[in-house]
Image (cartoon, grey):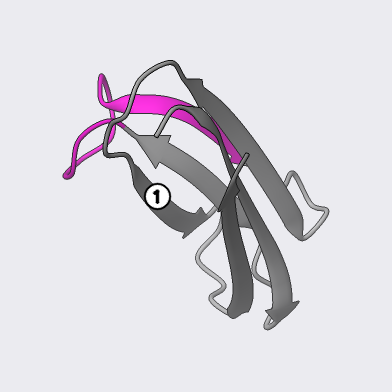
Amino acid sequence: EPGTLHVAVEAIGGGLDPVATIFKAPGCAGESTLRCTAAAGTGFAQTDYTFSSPTTRFISVDQSAHTGGSYRMTAWMD
């Protein structure tokens, strides 16, 4: 349904600096990326994207370094 998709990613261990991305199609980034937010050293990233009609979107969680770690992701619509 139309609305705003919110994605929040919080590092909960291991030094992860998360990146949250919303895509319009599965696969690699690039022209498919709609919105991407990096934590920039805070351990928390949130990104949002508003849709005007029903559609399917894809969420990716990555990191800005190669340190690894645990995270908690929450996604919701309003």
Above or below, comparing residue 33 to residue 6 in the picture: above
- Left or right: 17 as drawn, with respect to 64: right
Q: Which residue is mark 1?
A: 59
- Residue bounds of the magenta highlight: 24-37
Residue at far right of view: 42
| Residue occupying the point 18% across, 44% down | 26
Q: Callout 1, which amino acid?
A: Ile
Q: Secondary structure under badge 1?
A: strand
Mark 1, other Cα within 10 Å: few <14 / some 14–19 / many ≥20: some
- Residue 22 occupies quadrant: top left
User: Camera-side residue: 40 or 52?
Assistant: 52
Q: Position of residue 62 (x, y in %)?
A: 47, 57
- Left or right: 13 as drawn, with respect to 74: right
| Residue occupying the point 35% across, 27% down | 33
Residue at far front of view: 1
- Left or right: 54 as drawn, with respect to 22: left
- Residue 55 occupies quadrant: top left
Q: Main secondary structure of the magenta part?
A: loop
